[in-house]
Image: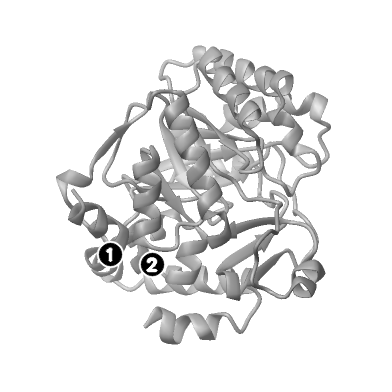
Amino acid sequence: MYRAIIRPLLFLFRPEAVHRLVVLLIKAAFLIPGMKPLVSSFYRVRNEKLRREVFGLTFENPVGLAAGFDKNARFFNQFSAFGFSFIEVGTFTPAGQPGNPRPRSFRLKRDRALINRMGFNNDGARAAARRLGKRRTRLIIGGNIGKNTSTPNEMAVEDYAAAFRELYDAADYFVVNVSCPNISDLSHLQDREQLDGILSRLSSIRAEKALKKPVLVKISPDLNNRQIDDVIELIGRNGMDGIIATNTTITREGLKTDPARVASIGSGGMSGSPLRQRSTEIIRYISEKTGGKLPIIGVGGIMSPPDALEKLEAGASLVQVYTGFVYEGPSLVRRINRSILANK
C-alpha cells in the first residue's frame, strides 16, 4: 500500500515538508491508546538469531535508522515501533543553527535517490540531551556530533568536544561526523592531522568518565584507499570503537535523471541507490584491511533486503537505512530482518 498509494501522494510535495507532515501524523496517531504496541507487533521481528553484540552493546537486530532523519531527537520514541534496534539522532552541534536556505532536499525519482544540503540544522546538543533524557524506549540511541558552520576548521575540535560532553550521559554511542559534504570544508577534517586532534580530544574526555561509551567515525564514500587507511590507523591509535561507511556523496556519475535537472539542484550530498556499490566496496575494503576486527556500520543505498545482505556479507556488523525508508516505507525494516533469518 505504501508504494502504490501513500508514496505517490507524499511525493507530490517537497521532501522537507513531507518529512514534517509524516512525523506529525505518526506522533498524533500514537497518542491513540494501544496504537504504538499494535504498530510494533506488525513491524518488529523478534528472534534471538537476529541479536548482535557490537562494540559492547547488544542490538536486538542489525537494522537501524541513520542520522539525519531525527535531527533533533524529537521522535525516536515513536519510530522505535517500526522495528529498528537502534536510531542515530543528529547531527548535533554545540549551538543550534538553522542550516542552509530552503529548498535544501530533493528527490531523484528515476534514480531512487535524494540530494540534500541541509547543513546540520538542529536545536543544539543541550536541547537534544534534554529530549533524550525523556527516553521511553530501550532502543539503542546513537548521538551524531559535528561542528557549527561558523566555526573554522582550526577550532573544530572545541565544537566536537563541547557536543560530546553535552550528550555523553544521554546517548549510548557516538558518531564523529567529519564527512558531511553540506558544511563548507568539513571533509578536510578527515585529513590525518585534523582528525587525529579531534579523536585524541574525545578519547581524553571519555577517559574522565566512569562509563566508557563507544565512539565511531563516519567517513565519506569519496575517499580513496590511502585516505581510508589513514582513518583506520587513527581510529586504532585513539582507541575508537568502529566506523560508519558511508556518508552521502558529491559525485553525480551514472544517473538516469536528466542532467539538466541534476544541475539545477546544485550542490549537496546524494544518498540512495546510486551509492550502494561504492558503499559496499568501502565496507569490504575496511573489513579485509582490518581482518574483520573493526566493527562497521554499513549505510548507503540499502533499498531492499538483498542490499542489506550485501553489506553484511561484505563485512558490516550492522546496517542503517534512510533513503530506502523514504522510498520503500517502514516495511523495509521487517523485510530485511526476515531476509536475514531466511539466509541463516
Quadrant (top left/top right/bottom left/bottom right) for the N terminus: bottom left
Q: Are marks 1 and 2 in contact (CB under 8 Å)?
A: yes
* Amino acid marked by disc 2: Pro
Residue 167 on image: x %, y %: 54, 33
Q: Which residue is disc 1 drawn over?
A: 43
Q: Residue at x 80, y 74 (%)?
A: 260
Q: Is residue 173 visible?
A: yes
Could you classify mark 1 by the number of other residues whose Cα lies within 10 Å: few (under 14), some (14-19), or many (20 or more)? many
Q: Residue at x 43, y 42 (%)?
A: 141
State the separation of the CA atoms marked 1 and 2.
8 Å
Residue 222 on image: x %, y %: 66, 42
Helix, strand or loop status at disc 2: loop
* Amino acid marked by disc 1: Tyr
Residue in front for this viewpoint, 277 or 64: 277
Q: Which residue is disc 2 drawn over?
A: 330
From the viewer's perspective, is residue 273 above or below residue 184? below
Helix, strand or loop status at disc 1: helix
Residue 29 on image: x %, y %: 39, 74
Q: Is residue 340 shown left or right of residue 160?
A: left
